Image: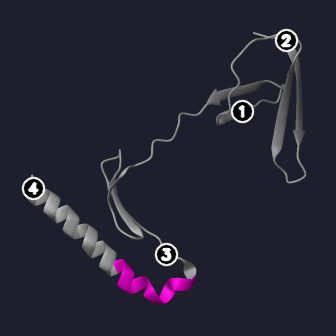
Amino acid sequence: MVEGVMTFGVLKNGLRMADFMCCEDVEMTPFISDFRVQGMRDGNLYMQQRPKRVRNKALFRDDNASLSHGQDGKWYFYFSLDEDRIGELPNQLVRQAKAIAQKVERELIRR
């Protein structure tokens, strides 16, 4: 526990901010993190660090597509293509989806 002064405010873009200035000499490791912050009517501020996001690892990849298995037990197929290549989208989507499906099929046969 440390004593200090906290300043609350609203930025020009409408986002809220809070600064805490410690009034004591404290030795601690600096850090940057994402927090869930709850500001109460009485001025109390409660902060809880959010856990790091666990990303799905791609099991199979192609040029613009990947297939991953989520922690929720679902399969995810991701495809992205630049906006100016819209004419190629149908052919590329089918080609890359087929290529990944063939990779999955080969993997299942190996098992």
In the picture of the structure, the residue carrying the numbered disc 2 is 3
Gap between marks 2 and 4 measured at Cα: 63 Å
Q: Residue at x 47, y 71 (%)?
A: 80
In the picture of the structure, the residue carrying the numbered disc 1 is 38
> Residue 87, which numbered label?
none
Q: Secondary structure at mark 1?
A: strand
- Residue 76 appears in the figure: no
Gap between marks 1 and 4 measured at Cα: 52 Å
Q: Is residue 91 left or right of residue 81?
A: left
Image x and y of residue 36, in percent: 65, 35
Type of residue at label 4? Arg
Type of residue at label 1? Gln
Q: Which mark sits nearer the N-terminus, 4 or 3? A: 3
Gap between marks 3 and 2 measured at Cα: 53 Å
In the picture of the structure, the residue carrying the numbered disc 4 is 110
- Of 50 and 43, nearer the camera is 50
Q: Secondary structure at mark 4?
A: helix
- Residue 80 appears in the figure: yes
Q: Is residue 37 left or right of residue 102?
A: right
Residues drawn in magenta? 84-93
In the picture of the structure, the residue carrying the numbered disc 3 is 81
Gap between marks 1 and 3 measured at Cα: 39 Å
